[in-house]
Image (spheres, grey):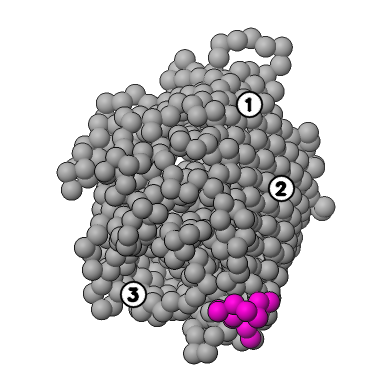
């Protein structure tokens, strides 16, 4: 609790003393296109819904795209494997969402979460996202919108990419631990046809005794045009390839007794490789009668080979407990629908009807390995998993101060699992189908004195792994019921700071989960999560901009047991200031409170707080074309010793006679400097 008090005092100090600031690029000129009628709902249906603009995204330290998620009140992402490469671990609303099981992620409407993944259900690797290409993040908490289905229990996040950049950029940066990053981004055409191309290359060894050798390459190409005066077509393709070494989750006991450095490794052969190629099409046509036809499609090819070792020599005292997980898949799908604006009995209304589908064609395999040499197979499956979801949505505004929005989503899943390993102990096989109907209701009152009130109810779900779904008496879809009341206010005017407060509850039914690291299923009982969050973001005065939040959550199984890894307190604070001399500065602090690591609360993870500093300076250098900018990021400014992913389980080292249950963790990075220069042309 003392750390929490220190955190709140530090954030207050940021907002009142530190002269830091907001990046502010010149507003881009409007594109000259034919007149288009735009039909759209009022954007806010819940107090917790928000949009994170690109001005905040580009001020985050470079290297991990998931860093931007801490801009969302109550959300954190931490490294999971002692080195970059593997998907992050996500926390939101009392969920340790692991790699994405209860938070839905999208990129321009394309799902990122991977169903029936070799490592974990809903696995979400954000490494294919280039932060500078992001126009902003659409954030939806709870399950209140019928457009979102699988994994959107705690919420959904959509990364929206920009159509063009007004200035191209060539950027080179580097820092400690052999870290290097290079970026090229430009728009060859900006008028009737708008194009965007970006290339990123990133390398780091990290602070670990055994170099990460993490190498990531990203490519993006996007084209947007208007075929007529009333439509818009966008085509986007991305390619990502990564490889890395990892130091894994290490036992706290060997760090405490001095046997191992906190940046050391028990099995330094951990790591992996991954590849992802995607294609996305977004299209809409606005009719002359106030309607809009929309159609979107996407496709992905994905590949992962992951080598881990959590328990060391517990199961195999000779060769060790190394695990190899491989995933090969093609995923495709899309949606089509129609939205109409009009009046019903004189009441302004908007109605939407749509249909979504998704197909995953998967080959997932789990086996044993020693220093990345395969030694056996645990499960080997071909999976064809598909979902189909019609939905309807309506919004009516009977008076100027009352708005009602709601809808219904009907989801149907089909599973076809074919076992390829006749000698394996676990041999999931079979076919099954399952469905769920999800109502959504939202009430918005106001505004009065720039203040709105919200009440929301919605039902969502996350799908379970197909290999457990086909088992007898299984529950393929885990229903979640979410409730929320909140308030949003701008007491000092529409351009000034916004205050947000939300109280919420989420009930999740009993579910059957496939444990990818073991190839077995695990039954979890019903649970309840409830809490509140407060946030403030916006302009305080002049060039000073602040963004801060505090959340409290109680997460328990209905029998009173704690939900392992669920955080009780989280907080974030940032102060940003643009100096008149061309310097933009940001100081931000992130806090994660104590978490129970097992159900009886006898083992808990420590809390931590870290500070980051960002500086961007427009160099006073006259160039024939363009401008120059220098930047500096300092992560963990005060060199705090902190832990990222933290777990409690049994493991056994080679020299230990019996297994020992205790804390295993991934160390947080020490103070790290990274800087560079960018040429905007």
Q: Quadrant of the C terminus?
A: top right
Residue 281 sits above or below residue 384 on the image: above
Give the label, 1 or 2, closer to the camera. 2
Residue 511 sits above or below residue 213 on the image: below
Return the residue at label 3.
527
Residue 171's tag is 1
**Magenta span contains residue 424:** yes
Which SS class for mark 1? strand
Which SS class for mark 2? strand
Return the residue at label 2.
239
Q: Main secondary structure of the magenta part?
A: loop
Residue 499 sits above or below residue 567 on the image: above
Q: Is 60 on the left or on the right of 28, as rendered?
A: left
Given residues 138 and 191, the one toward you in this image is 138
Q: Is 437 on the left or on the right of 483, as rendered?
A: right
The span from disc 3 to disc 2 (Cα, nearest Å) is 39 Å
Q: How dense is the environment of label 3, judged by Cα within 10 Å: few (below 14), some, or many (20 and up)?
A: many
For the image, the number of numbered tags is 3
- Region of the chain picked out in magenta, as a range: 420-430
The span from disc 1 to disc 2 (Cα, nearest Å) is 20 Å
Percent position of residue 319, x then y: 51, 58
- Residue at image position (63%, 41%) is 216
Percent position of residue 157, x then y: 52, 56
Residue 618 sits above or below residue 243 on the image: above
Residue 675 shows up from this direction: yes
- Residue at image position (56%, 11%) is 620
Residue 105 shows up from this direction: no
Tag 2 or tag 1, which sits nearer the N-term?
1
Percent position of residue 514, x then y: 50, 73
Q: Residue placed farthest to the bottom in the image?
A: 473
- Residue at image position (70%, 70%) is 361
């Amino acid at each position: 609790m003392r750390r929490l008090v220190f955190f709140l005092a530090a954030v207050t100090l940021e907002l009142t003393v530190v002269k830091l600031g907001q990046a502010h690029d010149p507003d881009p000129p409007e594109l000259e296109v034919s007149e288009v009628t735009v039909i759209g709902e009022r954007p806010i249906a819940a107090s917790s819904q928000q949009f994170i603009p690109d001005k905040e995204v580009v001020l985050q330290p470079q290297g991990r795209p998931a860093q931007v998620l801490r801009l969302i009140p109550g959300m954190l992402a931490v490294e999971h494997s002692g080195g970059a490469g593997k998907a992050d671990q996500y926390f939101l609303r009392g969920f340790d969402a692991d790699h994405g099981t209860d938070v839905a992620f999208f990129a321009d409407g394309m799902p990122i979460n991977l169903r029936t993944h070799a490592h974990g259900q809903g696995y979400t690797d954000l490494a294919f996202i280039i932060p500078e290409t992001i126009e902003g993040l659409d954030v939806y908490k709870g399950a209140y919108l019928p457009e979102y289905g699988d994994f959107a229990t705690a919420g959904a996040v959509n990364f929206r990419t920009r159509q063009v950049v007004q200035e191209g950029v060539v950027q080179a940066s580097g820092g400690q631990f052999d870290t290097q990053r290079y970026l090229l981004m430009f728009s060859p055409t900006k008028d009737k046809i708008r194009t965007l191309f970006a290339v990123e290359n990133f390398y780091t060894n990290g602070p670990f005794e055994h170099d990460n050798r993490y190498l990531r390459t990203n490519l993006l190409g996007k084209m947007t045009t208007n075929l007529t005066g009333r439509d818009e077509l966008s085509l986007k393709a991305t390619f990502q390839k990564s490889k890395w070494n990892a130091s894994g989750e290490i036992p706290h006991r060997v760090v405490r007794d001095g046997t191992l450095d906190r940046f050391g490794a028990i099995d330094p052969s951990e790591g992996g490789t991954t590849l992802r190629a995607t294609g996305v099409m977004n299209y809409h046509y606005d009719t002359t009668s106030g309607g809009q036809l929309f159609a979107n499609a996407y496709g992905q090819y994905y590949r992962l080979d992951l080598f881990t070792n959590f328990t060391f020599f517990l199961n195999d005292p000779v060769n060790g407990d190394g695990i190899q997980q491989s995933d090969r898949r093609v995923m495709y799908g899309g949606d089509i629908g129609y939205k109409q604006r009009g009046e019903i009995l004189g009441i302004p209304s908007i109605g939407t009807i749509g249909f979504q589908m998704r197909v995953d064609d998967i080959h997932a395999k789990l086996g044993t390995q020693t220093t990345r040499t395969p030694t056996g197979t645990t499960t080997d499956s071909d999976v064809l998993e598909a979902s189909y979801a019609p939905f309807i949505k309506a919004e009516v505004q009977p008076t100027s101060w009352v708005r009602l929005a709601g809808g219904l989503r009907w989801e149907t899943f089909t599973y076809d699992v074919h076992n390829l390993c006749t000698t394996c102990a676990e041999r999931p096989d079979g076919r099954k189908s399952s469905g769920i109907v999800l109502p959504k209701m939202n009430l918005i009152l106001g505004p009065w004195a720039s203040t709105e009130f919200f009440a929301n109810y919605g039902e969502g779900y996350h799908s379970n792994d197909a290999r457990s779904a086909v088992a007898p008496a299984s529950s393929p879809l885990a229903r979640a019921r979410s409730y929320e009341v909140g308030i949003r206010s701008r007491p000092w005017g529409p351009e000034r700071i916004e205050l947000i407060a939300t109280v919420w509850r989420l009930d999740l039914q009993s579910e059957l989960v496939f444990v990818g690291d073991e190839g077995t299923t695990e039954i979890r009982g019903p649970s309840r999560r409830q809490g509140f969050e407060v946030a403030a973001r916006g302009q305080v005065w002049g060039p000073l901009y602040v963004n801060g939040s505090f959340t409290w959550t109680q997460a328990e199984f209905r029998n009173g047991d704690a939900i392992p890894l669920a955080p009780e307190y989280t907080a974030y604070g940032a102060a940003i200031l643009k100096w008149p001399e061309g310097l933009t500065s940001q100081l931000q602090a992130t806090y994660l409170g104590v978490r129970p690591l097992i159900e009886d609360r006898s083992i808990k993870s420590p809390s931590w707080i870290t500070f980051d500093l960002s500086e961007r300076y427009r160099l006073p250098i006259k160039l024939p074309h363009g401008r120059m900018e220098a930047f500096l990021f300092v992560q963990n400014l005060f060199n705090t010793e902190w832990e990222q992913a933290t777990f409690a389980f049994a493991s056994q080292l080679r020299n230990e006679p019996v297994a020992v249950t205790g804390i295993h963790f991934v160390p947080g990075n020490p103070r790290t400097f990274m800087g560079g220069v960018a040429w905007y042309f």
